[in-house]
Amino acid sequence: MDLSFATQQVIYGLTLGCLYGLLAIGYTMVYGVLRLINFAHGDLLMVSAYVAFFGIIIFSLPWPVAFLGAAIFTAVIGILIDRGAYKPIRKSPRISALITAIGVSFLLENLALVLIGGRPKSFPIPTLFNGSLSIGELKVPVLSLWILSLTLVLLVIVIGIVHKTRIGMAMRALSRDIETVSLMGIDENRVISFTFALGSILAAFGGVMWCMRYPAVEPFMGVIPGLKAFVAAVLGGIGNVTGAAIGGLILGLAEVLIVAIQPDWSGYRDAIAFCIMIVILLTRPRGIMGENLPD
Amino acid sequence: MARIVSLTLTFVVLMFSLASGKEPINLGALLPMTGSVAAFGQMGWDGFQTARKIQPEALGRPVELKLSDTKSDKVDSANAVSRLIEKEKVVAILGEMISGDTIAAGDYAERAKIPMISPTATNPIVTQGKKYIFRVCFIDPEQGRVGAKLALENLKAKTAAIIYDISQDYCVGLKTFFQREFTQSGGKIVSETMFKTGDRDFTPQLSRIKSMNPEVIYAPIYYTECALIAKQAREMGLNVPILAGDGVQAPEFIQLGGKDVEGVYFTTHFHEDMVDNPLAKKYLELFKKDTGKELDAFAAQAGDAYFILIDAINRAGSTDPEKIRNAIVETKDFNGVTGKITMKPDGNAIKAMVVSKVKDGKFAYVTTIMP
């Protein structure tokens, strides 16, 4: 394997990894605050893909408007999911919330199935994101550059919000102890809604980028990326935003490199990705960036 | 998650016939209406309904089609077929469209002794050792052979790379038959990579293929993955011809692939240009009028499965599943939508094969080959 081949694979791996990372951040933030694995998170990717798709195709909106609309719509859906499905059972055992999350995931998928139908739709890719640059033997898809820089920018913004703003401080406080924080006069539901909105916006951008990279929009498109992003979040140390991004990158790179180096194993692509997770969790049970604190 | 725990979404379509108050004959339509090959299921359903309009009765009794969704999933296929047999009490079943699901459902139908006719499941295992399972299409050893011949002779390729879906019986089977034929005829397989249904990123597999410089890529897979593979291949500058099987012939293939699937060759069952008998002409006309779509191979095959079943019921003179089964086996030189069909005792049909190609955003007819 020569250098340009390897570099090429790294580019593909990073692109895929960033998409996992964008989704993983949402998982990790919700988990950090509520200790809830929001299985419906992957399906928000599908929601945003459909909104952007309909925005462009049916309402002929210019793409920036459609993409922004998709982000806002997805954020609203994220908040509604929390208010409608999770808030009423906030005080119930954690397992109830987990089952509810799976239920919401099914609801979204099948709602899309009934309303829109199961046949995949092609996603219109704006020319700005199309094509690829040739550097020597390397082919760098323009979209990869967009995905990489968007992920970086969004990651910086999220970290900034979590660590530098009052609402971020409230989020961090909630992740320690919800009851005490609400006793301090902080409206916990407002903070939780904000967390869902922020996570959903990331999922929305992830979704739009995902279907420009892999242009087949269908009701179950969020299932596999959602699962992978969950792995990425666990890998990085669930609850940690930077960890989620790093987990995503590791997963994306591992998946691509394994297949590129050892094509005979390409059928075991997912198995290997999950094995990596098991190995990392065996050596570092709290994930790569997870804090080593007792509960 | 949805595939792990299944949900039941079944459509029961009751089409009321004008034919008095006679007790209807219930036939099952086992189709992938949702999931990864939903396009095939919906094409099949369009086909059954058009066929039913032409022949709404058998034995003077109205025919009712009970639709059951397999969600393009093997486990759900088994559930869907048991529902048709146990709950809807169907006397025969039409479906499924793809091999893996038909194999899964076939076991159940075989044990229940309910005859089942698949329009398009091409893997040999579908009918192997089964007395009640039939198909009205060719089988994959033939398709693989024609594919290899096409690669060697028409595309003048000496080396080929294969990319296929390891989670689909159809893809694994067709890949094996192509491989055997291609290497026996002097070709060389330089790369063999795989993925599984639902995968969306094929860049590492394709980079590997690119580094091996094959003269043709054989992709015996379904339309969504094949379209994305063509896109990602062209994007990385991998411009060799792509050759596929009948699994790509859905409108989605062209919608998803756009200009990147131009020039893709594939072996298939049917092309509109083949229509040559009165039933086929009537069917083509009605299908276009009702759906406003081109008549594709899957709908045409579905039509034939329906017509052959009705023909068998009429010849059997009874709705007893055993008698229907015996009548299906005796089908000989039936003039169907896709041409003359003769059923062999092993459950397979003797059929011609069509080679098509994507040209100017359409499926264009290339040639017909009689195996």
Image: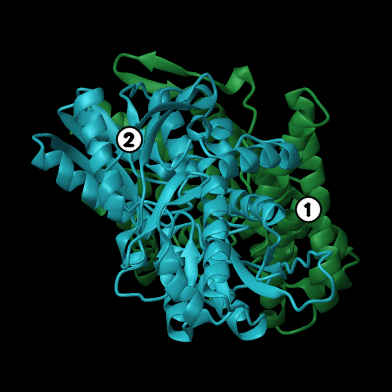
Chain colours: A green, B cyan
Quarter of the figure that contains the C terminus of chain B? top left
Of labels 2 and 1, the one closer to you: 1
Q: CA–CA distance between discs 2 and 1? A: 35 Å
Q: Tell me whether the residue at label 2 lies in contact with that at label 1, contact meaning CB atoms closer than 8 angstroms.
A: no
Mark number displayed over residue B149: none
> For this view, does B318 lie left or right of residue B348?
right
Q: Few, some or many C-alpha atoms within 10 Å of disc 1 (few <14, some 14-19, many ≥20)?
A: few
- Same chain under badges 2 and 1? The reply is no
Residue underneath mark 2 = B206
Q: Residue sitting at 23 percent across and 44 percent down?
A: B178
> For this view, does A88 lie left or right of residue B329?
right
Q: Amino acid at mark 2?
A: Leu
User: Is A198 situated above or below B31?
Assistant: above
Circle 2 — which element? Answer: helix
> For this view, does B355 lie left or right of residue B51?
left
Circle 1 — which element? Answer: helix
Quarter of the figure that contains the N terminus of chain B? bottom right
- Circle 1 marks a residue in which chain? A
Confirm whether residue B369 shows in the render: yes
Residue A201: x and y in percent read: 72, 45
Q: Few, some or many C-alpha atoms within 10 Å of disc 2 (few <14, some 14-19, many ≥20)?
A: many
Mark number displayed over residue A115: 1
Locate residue B214: give its quadrant.
top left
